[in-house]
Image (tube, rainbow, N blue to C red):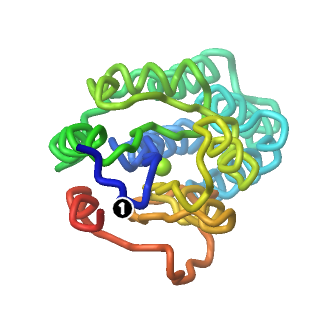
Amino acid sequence: MKTNDFPYRLIAIDADDTLWDCQSHFEVVERQYASLLADFTDKETVAEELFATEHRNMEDLGYGVKAFIISLCETAIRISKGKIDAACLAKIINLGRSLLTFPTTPLPEVRETLSQLQQQANMRNYRLVVFTKGELQDQENKLRRSGLWNFFDDVIIVADKNTEAYRHLCDQFSIEPHELLMIGNSYKSDCAPALAIGAYAIHIPYHVMWRMEETKEESHPRLRKIKHFSEILQLL
Ligand SMILES: [Mg+2]
């Protein structure tokens, strides 16, 4: 028997820092990167310069590890005024590459909650998908390493999670925006654009946040904020 009054037909869940930890691995790499560049400048300057490079590269290179590695190299060359040697650049590239293989162990309550959501999907007539931005290969590999892939009906990876991407997601699944529930750690990528097109959102902030994702957060009648992943079940 299907429950016809269930409001959502698509539940979309973000991946990085929602299903598993990602940002803290980037922060470890950034600290090691700063110590490789310690002969040239202090770690605060390294952080500022790297952020500026990433910001500049965003439009052409987008999100992901490949873009990050290019930004690491460009920043190192600039900070060292071209004096950085090939051996050090190789270390920097390897540091960046380590972000392609870190363990994507599911965060607490994730596996159990996804299992429940999957079990309820048929009766409540919704589909459960991952909706994430970044590089196709890397995002797919992370999902595979997490062991969570089988909980989902589909995995949608986009270059950026803007309002256009959310509208396209609704079109792909032949639903109206008000039938979409988006769940994720970033207010800027997971909540604001979903709310803007008329969808619902659940915000689960993570304890570390990438500076690029920082934004002013506002309350909204279609937005809920929770602390623990399993609280999703109570809100449905
Ligand atoms: Mg995220």
The residue at the point 56 percent across, 78 percent down is 217
| Residue situated in front as seen by the camera: 159 or 166 | 166
For label 1, the SS is: loop
Q: Residue at x 58, y 32 (%)?
A: 157
Q: Quadrant of the N terminus?
A: top left
Q: Quadrant of residue 190?
A: bottom right
x and y percentages locating residue 219 in the rendered image: 52, 83
Q: Around disc 1, counting alpha carbons within 10 Å, would you say few (fewer than 14), some (14 to 19), or many (20 or more)?
A: few
> In the visual, does 215 lie left or right of 128?
right
Residue at horizontal 76%, vertical 30%? Answer: 83
Residue plotted at (52% across, 54% down): 180
Residue beneath disc 1: 5
Q: Quadrant of the C terminus?
A: bottom left
Q: How many marks?
A: 1
Q: Nearer the viewer, residue 221 or 176?
A: 176
Residue type at the position of mark 1: Asp
Q: Position of residue 183 (x, y in %)?
A: 43, 55
Note whether 215 is above or below 37 in the view shown.
below
The answer to whether 54 appears left or right of 110 in the picture is right
- Whether 225 is drawn above or below 120: the answer is below
Is the CB–ligand 1 distance for label 1 below 8 Å? no
**Percent from the top left, x then y, of residue 215?**
62, 71
Estimate the x, y position of residue 81 in percent, counting from the top left.
Answer: 82, 38
Q: Quadrant of residue 22?
A: top left
